[in-house]
Amino acid sequence: MKLESISVVGKDANQSGVGKKFLIISIFLTVLLNLSIANWFFMNDMGRFLVK
């Protein structure tokens, strides 16, 4: 088995930019999900979810 094939695959993935696009999309979706959850808490009287 040749170990060089692994490094070639990594170089091809970096050159195509798929990893960078996936990272940006995943961060954007994570932020969007967190904002929607925060918005839901504010719209539904957040005080009742907090421990008093």
Image (cartoon, grey):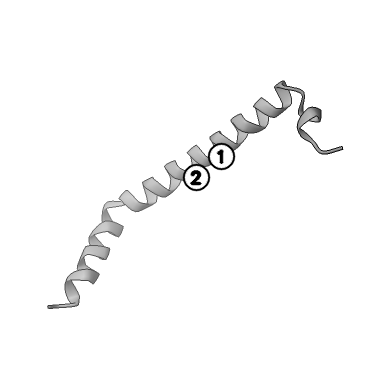
Residue at screen point 38% across, 51% down = 20
The picture places residue 41, in percent across and down from the top left corner, at 70, 28
Residue assigned mark 1? 31
As helix, strand or loop, the secondary structure at mark 1 comes to helix
Q: Please state which amino acid type lies under the numbered disc 1.
A: Val
Residue 27 marker:
2
Residue at screen point 30% across, 59% down = 14
Instruction: Name the residue nearer the viewer: 1 or 49.
Output: 49
Q: Is residue 13 above or below residue 44?
A: below
Q: Residues within 10 Å of mark 1 (few under 14, many from 20)?
A: few
The picture places residue 34, in percent across and down from the top left corner, at 60, 37
Toward the left, the furthest residue is: 1
Q: Please state which amino acid type lies under the numbered disc 2.
A: Ile
Instruction: Name the residue nearer the viewer: 47 or 18.
Output: 47
Q: Is residue 41 above or below residue 15?
A: above
Q: Quarter of the image for the C terminus: give it.
A: top right
Answer with left or right where residue 12 lies relative to residue 32: left
How many numbered discs? 2
Mark 1 vs 2: CB contact within 8 A: yes
The picture places residue 18, in percent across and down from the top left corner, at 31, 49
